[in-house]
Image: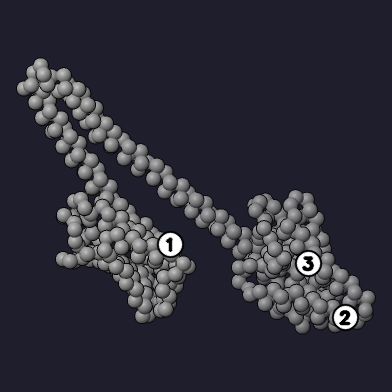
Amino acid sequence: MYHWFHIFPKNTGLSLFAWIAFCILPFYFIIRSATMYEIIIGVAMIVLFFATYRLSFIKKGWTVYVALSIEMLISIGMTIYFGYVYFALFIAFFIGNVKSRSGFISLYVVHLSTTIIAFTVGFLLEPDVYSAQLPFNVLGILGVILLPFTIYNRIRREELENQLSDANERISQLMVVEERQRIARDLHDTLGQKLSLIGMKSDLAKKLLKVNPDLAEQELGDINQTSRTALREVREIVSNMRTARLEEEMIQVEALLESSEITCKIEGGESFKHLPLLIEDVFCMCLRESVTNVVKHSQSTQCTIILENLPNEWRLDVVDDGVGMVGKEPTTHNSGLIGMKERLEFVNGKLEIRSNKGTQLTIRIPRIIYQKEGGQL
């Protein structure tokens, strides 16, 4: 959706003030003309140009081409009679926004040809006027030549980047679905068969309990062994999932930082390979939130992630060289930090924030009440 201020082109290499100047300059060229009649005609052409220029953005279909034709005619007239070639830059910007390649090329050739012809005719009719402002007119023609391609290529690049982002998001969703299906298959292959076997042997043991106690006792032993085997296989599945989760999280945050043009450095990742499930979940959440804050708020160029497996605690440091956050205590506006603190409370952990030429977030979780790393809580 376009608003009124989209009359001024964006991301063209020129500031808004330069485009405002291009809008004001024609009044100067008109006012300096000799007769009141030329002034009235010139002002009317300026108003008509910007009215049609506005319509060319908000309308579709044939209306756009009619408006663009009127703009080109006005630009030709202003160039010949008043020596004002800068309207052609506005048209060049609009042509760069044309999505159709054939339409872009056609309009580009027509606009460039008419602009050069109008400039040549005006120069032959009033050589003194054009010579006085020749550098500005040459810059205007260079803009007519280069600006449409610059805008066109930038828009195409942004579209490709958006498509790539959508594709990556779709791939991530498919990976999640595939992982869920893999987990479902693994659980079915382990628990499904084992539980079915336990059920059948339980029914058999119940029937044999009075008829043949020795055989019933043997079946109960098989049930016990089968249940232990199923439990061990489930723990192996959970262990593999747990190992992959933190590794994948590290890969994702590293990719996020690099895509944001922030240099990423990771130290001590190997020391966090065997963590209790709950501890790993907390670290994953804290790491994700910390890196997200670095990307959104720090304005930093480098981020260092340090993981330490100490005798008395697990420790995670996220350090950046950004603007810092002195005096910015967690509030409802940065609920991510509040969520980190609340999650850490479940495991007696602490969140420390230091800000001195950047920000350092330190997450500490004590090694208490845990049986052993990689085991259960």
Residue to which mark 3 is pinned: 50
Residue to which mark 2 is pinned: 33
Up the image or down, 224 lies above or below 298; here it is: above
Coloring basis for residues: one colour
Up the image or down, 259 lies above or below 242; here it is: below
- Distance from label 2 to label 1 (Cα)? 55 Å
User: Of helix, strand and loop, which one carries label 2?
Assistant: loop
- Distance from label 3 to label 2 (Cα)? 21 Å
**Measuring 87% from the left and 70% from the top, which residue is drawn there?**
44
User: Of helix, strand and loop, which one carries label 1?
Assistant: helix
Q: Nearer the viewer, residue 329 or 291?
A: 329
Work out whether mark 3 precedes mark 1 in sequence or the reverse, and give the earlier one: 3
Residue at the far top: name it. Answer: 211
The reply to whether residue 307 is in sight is no
Residue type pointed to by label 2: Ser
Question: Which quarter shows the N terminus?
Answer: bottom right
Q: Residue 283: image x %, image y %? A: 30, 60
Q: Residue 147: image x %, image y %? A: 65, 66
Residue at the far left: name it. Answer: 214
- Distance from label 3 to label 1 (Cα)? 40 Å
Q: Residue 159: image x %, image y %? A: 56, 55
Q: Quadrant location of residue 114? A: bottom right
Q: Nearer the viewer, residue 170 or 235?
A: 235
Work out whether mark 2 precedes mark 1 in sequence or the reverse, and give the earlier one: 2
Residue to which mark 1 is pinned: 259
Residue type pointed to by label 1: Ser
User: Of helix, strand and loop, which one carries label 3?
Assistant: helix
